[in-house]
Image (cartoon, grey):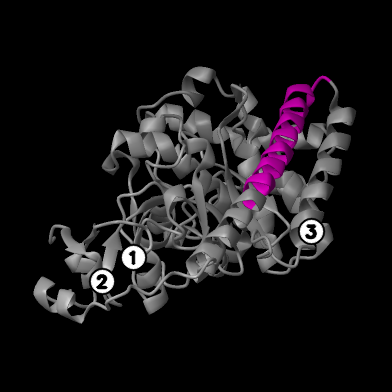
Amino acid sequence: MLDDVNITMNQLRVGLYIELDLKWFEHPFAFSHFKIKTEEQINTLRSLGLQTVRYNPGLSDIAPPPLDQAEAEAPDEPTPAPDVSPALAAKRAMMERLKQHRAEASRIEGAFAKTARTIRDIEKNLFTKPEESARQANELIGQISDSILCAPELAIHVMGDTLGNEELYFHSLNVTMLSIMIAREVQLPAELASVLGLGALFHDIGRKNIPDKILTKVEPYTQSEQHLYELHAQYGYDMAQKLQLPAAVGAIVRDHHELFDGNGYPRRLKGEAIGVLARIVAIANYYDELCNPVSVAQALTPHEALSMMFAKHRARFDPKLLQVFIRCLGVYPPGTIVQLSNNMTGMVATVNTAKPMRPMLVIYDASVPRHEAIMVDMEQEPDLQIVNAIRPGQVPPEVYAYLSPRKRVSYYFDGKSGTPESP
């Protein structure tokens, strides 16, 4: 890769990729690194009072003219930048969108925390106060399914694993949200979506009868331990009946580990012999277990989890439902760290299921305080592209700490486009 080269302001040309050694708030551009597209941008750059800027040969379309040629061609009087340049106007609009995005993110995190705490109460009281827990569960699933199914567009947000030092990761919430997302895309009737949501919420209740030393074991199970663990599906079905949950909910609880190729459990069902609701939960459950295993060190990134499910394990799942799932989350699901075409690093914060390849990103910029981090809506930046996903261990520690990828990936869904209107 070619090193950056310093050039004078007179050597600036359309097509050069430049990198400003200024803090983000000290210039009017959306990014400190960008390719020059217009003469207006050159005039604005020259008005900043800089003597030189760095340009990146590898990302530029052209080379700058030699210094003597550039000086000879320079106008006697530089063209003054307008009082409000297009770049400054765009930056002001971007900052207003940032303000709206932060307010929206705060609202979403509050809703997520409330939902997570409700689930905690349901799980805590399920057997001591079954009627109250069932009422809470039905009410919660009704709210979630209504908001997801009825929204014109659906935005998927990655959440923090703690809020106010409170652990708020719930596998059951992730599986519920992801399952109802699939239900929306396949246009499942609202009544079935509610049943699906309850089944997803309670899919692992049978684990209460499995010893903690099995549930928390990091090493591979022995044959006898695997057999004991697999009993949780039948235990859960028995509990669902005891709690008088609908039969269709119990079927999901029993069959969520059945696999399309017939290698699942407890009954080794195959293909469409597995109920469609259980097939949906199987996909959501498997994905979340890859992202959030017992040992955080063994976790896959959301991007890796989707890739593995498609490339190596697709025979395990209903092919049509798996395709829908991947299409909704996009190639780079929320929580994925990405390298961008402008050489910057970011994290996918929000994906709109209607436009999964143009997500909302949190951008690493050392000149911007972390609590004021730049958020970029790729819908507003048509020239910006994601080059590839990056494992957390491949980014410098300061970048990792700034972007704060979650130890536990939690999702929350919002029945909006996720893109506030431009002012």
Asked if residue 297 is positioned above or below residue 180 in the image, the reply reads above
Q: Quadrant of the N terminus?
A: bottom left
Q: Is residue 409 visible?
A: yes
Mark 1 and mark 2 in contact? Answer it, CB < 8 Å.
yes
| Relative depth, front residue between 111 and 294 | 111
Question: Can you tell which quarter of the image residue 303 is in?
Answer: bottom left
Left or right for 22, reference 306: left
Identify the residue under disc 3: 192
Asked if residue 104 is positioned above or below residue 312 in the image, the reply reads above
Identify the residue under disc 1: 46
Q: Is residue 385 visible?
A: no
Q: Which stretch did the figure color magenta?
A: 101-128
Magenta part mainly helix, strand or loop?
helix
Q: Residue at point 82% right, 32% down? A: 243
- Estimate how packed mark 3 is, as few (under 14), some (14 to 19) or many (20 or more) residues with alpha carbons within 10 Å: some
Callout 1: helix, strand or loop? Answer: helix
Residue depth check, mark 3 versus mark 1: number of the one nearer the observer: 1
Asked if residue 395 is positioned above or below residue 164 in the image, the reply reads below
- The disc placed on residue 12 is 2
